[in-house]
Amino acid sequence: MATDIKNKNDILSILKGYVEEFLDFANQNMHDRAEKARDYYDGYQWTEKEVRHLENRKQPPITINRIKPKVMFLKGMEAQNRTDPKALPRTPNDDKSGEVSTDALRYVEEVNRSDYEFSDGFENYIIEGVEAHEVIAELNKKKQQFEVVHNRLFYDRIFWDIHSRKKNFSDATYLGTFQWMDEKQARIDFKGAPEEFFNFEEGDGTSRDDDAFSDRPMYFIDKDRKRVRVFLCYFLHENVWHYAVFSGGGFAISPSPSPYLDEDGEPEPQFVFRSAFVDRDGTRYGEVESYLDPQDEINKRRSKLLHFLSTRQTWGKKGAVNDINDLKKQMSMPDGHLEFNIGEWGKDVGIVDTSDMANGQMQLLIEAKSEIDVQGANSVLQGDVPQPLSGRAVQSLQQGGVVDLGSLFDGHRECKNRVYRMMFNRIKQFWNEERWVRVLGDENKLRWTGLNRPLTVRDVLLEQGISEEELPQGDPRLDMPAMMNGQPIIDNPVNELDVDILIDEAADSISLQHEQFELLVKMYQANPQAIDFKLLIRASQLRNKDELIKMLEGGTDAQQAALIQAQQQEQQEAKQIALLTQVAKIDKDKASAEKDRASAGKMAQETQQIAVETATDLEQATHPGREIA
């Protein structure tokens, strides 16, 4: 691990430079693109100049928002395909470790309502292009124990290494976030920080203002309040992740190695960032960006078509009408009246036929709608099925839509996996005390799992299958701590858990699996003898299919009863043997302890006698003739 950083002023300049370069890069085009995607999702799809132009021609700025339904559908897919994390043991003997780790992870997930945090992050992922999360350990002062906390971070409150090109930011050398704070609040939150940190006259850590990271809401800022951006930055120094909290004036928390450790015991940042797409310039963007141009065309084509249908181009001989503007006004009214000085309609005065232009605009509008419909979550996947189509054709179109979204959901799944891994790292590092976690298991059955729990002799015997009734009643040895090799036996020691984290999500295989199951059912119906019924159960989506298969494999009632009786007799004998063994072991340990104490007492007496004799000899040698008391 790297030593402490000595020249902290140089580090402060470097960290400010990181913020500067990111703001320069972001404000060139990245944040404009991200904010445009967010505005289009929210329905703000006309510029002020365009709105004024429409108002001048007496036309409302009509917005047909086709982006929001597509985003909402993608969010619905993400929510529909939520699954809980699962920890897999790394060796055949670690099955229990996998179960315990899974219970701990799911407890942390439920307490933090991580499903909703991930859904909020997924929205940023597909709109602005980057989702961000943090996993930290916070001290619960009431319980005096650390809790693992998962938060989603806002897109406009994060910054990162602009030279990073990987979608998961694994090549980034710095990651950070910030918050706007009042000076009073900063002095409370960072009590004991050096005074230079509160020197807000130095600015907020950057040399200029910018719109992308401005204090919100901008129109409700009290100019007398001292507001400043406080930055939290994780950065690589000597190949070790460090962190610091700073403002323009100085550090609130000086640079030091990250307090959080990864699975290898090395410092890691508390952040997990993930982007949907990255262009060749390193600009990150989301799925919504591909919808912007078709959406613009839909709005403008429709507006243009409405203008064509509500106006007329006229022609006429000079002097045929007194007031041309009045003529156009009357022609635009359902009950308008036209008067002519001379001539006749169609010969001296008439309308220019623009139906071909209107039809052209209509055709382009239809094509724009088709273009946006086939992108991302296509219309068939969203339930808009053209008729007539066979069920197989509809399923093929839906599968195509799911395949197009595969990489998008894979990236989000990878982000979730890293967050769960960080949760597990925090659990191993900070859960040192005995605690119980609540888990809602299969069939909504509530159960509890103990972590770091010291076992008694009673606990060990009960775990071996011996019932409470079979234990010697009133024996105080049962409540003694269970020992092994002179050390207490701890149940589910968290710091020794070693597992792999898995998220089992497969949105792209649901339709195919359903199709294969239907085909298997038809084959079974055609020839039940040729296909084992248990195969149907295994291929199904039934929640308790393993239990159903076990019941089918149980055999007849008589066979089952005989098997159960034999198993019970065998278990009873094993329990008796285990009980006698444990009691004998306790007696042996007690006798050994008494023997050790007796041996120690005898050795102490002998040592004392030797010391007395040695002192006597020494006194006789130095003072001959003196009597020794």
Image: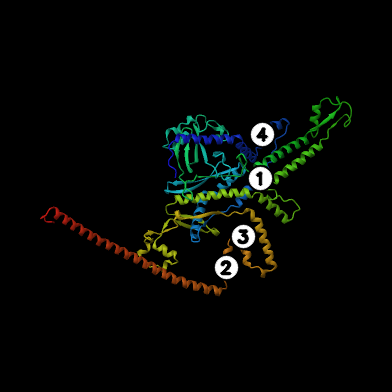
Q: Residue at x 21, y 58 (%)?
A: 608
* x, y percent for residue 111: 51, 50
Disc 4 secondary structure class: loop
Closer to the eye: label 1 or 3 = 3
Q: Residue at x 44, y 51 (%)?
A: 431
Q: Which residue is mark 1?
A: 69
**Which image quarter: residue 590?**
bottom left
**Which image quarter: residue 169?**
top right
20 to the left or right of 387: left
Q: Which mark is residue 551?
A: 2
Q: Earlier in the sequence, mark 1 or mark 4?
A: 4
Q: Which residue is mark 3?
A: 541
Q: Can the viewer see residue 215 in this picture?
A: no
60 lies above or below 408: above
- Quarter of the picture holding the N terminus: top left
Q: Earlier in the sequence, mark 4 or mark 2?
A: 4
State the separation of the CA atoms marked 2 and 3: 17 Å
State the separation of the CA atoms marked 1 and 4: 22 Å
